[in-house]
Amino acid sequence: MRRYSHRLDPEQKAIVAALRATGCSVLSLARLGGGCPDLLVGLNGTTFLIEVKAGRTPWKPVQRKFFETWRGHVATVATVDEALAVIRPERSKP
């Protein structure tokens, strides 16, 4: 298996802080590899997988494969607002 050095997207720290401020449990999965998303987030008994792709961070082939084959919910976000909309979809509605 090919190993990639993992660099955190610039927004990830702010996203993690915002999620925790809303009462979420947040676990970084960044070093797990295998295309696994960056964050495991829990709120009110629901678990979310979130990939942070801010700016022009390229997708790795192993990440694309994970997203194509994962049978659960997984989201990609670039901003704090997008991350909050994942955990609270009603916030994203007008």
Image (cartoon, helix red, strand yellow):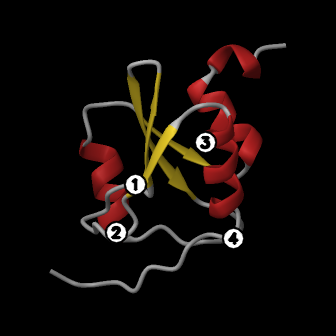
Tell which circle, 2 or 4, labels the residue nearer the N-terminal end: 4
In front: mark 1 or mark 3?
A: 3
Disc 2 designates what residue?
Answer: 61
Q: Residues within 10 Å of mark 3 (few under 14, many from 20)?
A: some
Residue wearing tag 4: 10
Which quarter of the image is occupied by the N terminus? bottom left
Q: Are marks 2 and 3 in contact (CB under 8 Å)?
A: no
Residue carrying label 3:
20
Comes first in the chain, label 2 or label 3: 3
- Residue occupying image coordinates x 30% and y 31%: 72
- The mark nearer the N terminus, 4 or 1, is 4
On screen, residue 68 versus residue 55, left or right, reads left
Residue topped by disc 1: 37
- Amino acid beneath label 2: Pro
Callout 4 amino acid: Pro
SS at mark 1?
A: loop
Give the Cα distance between marks 2 and 3: 30 Å
Q: Identify the image quadrant of residue 34.
A: bottom left
Give above or below for 47 relative to 58.
above
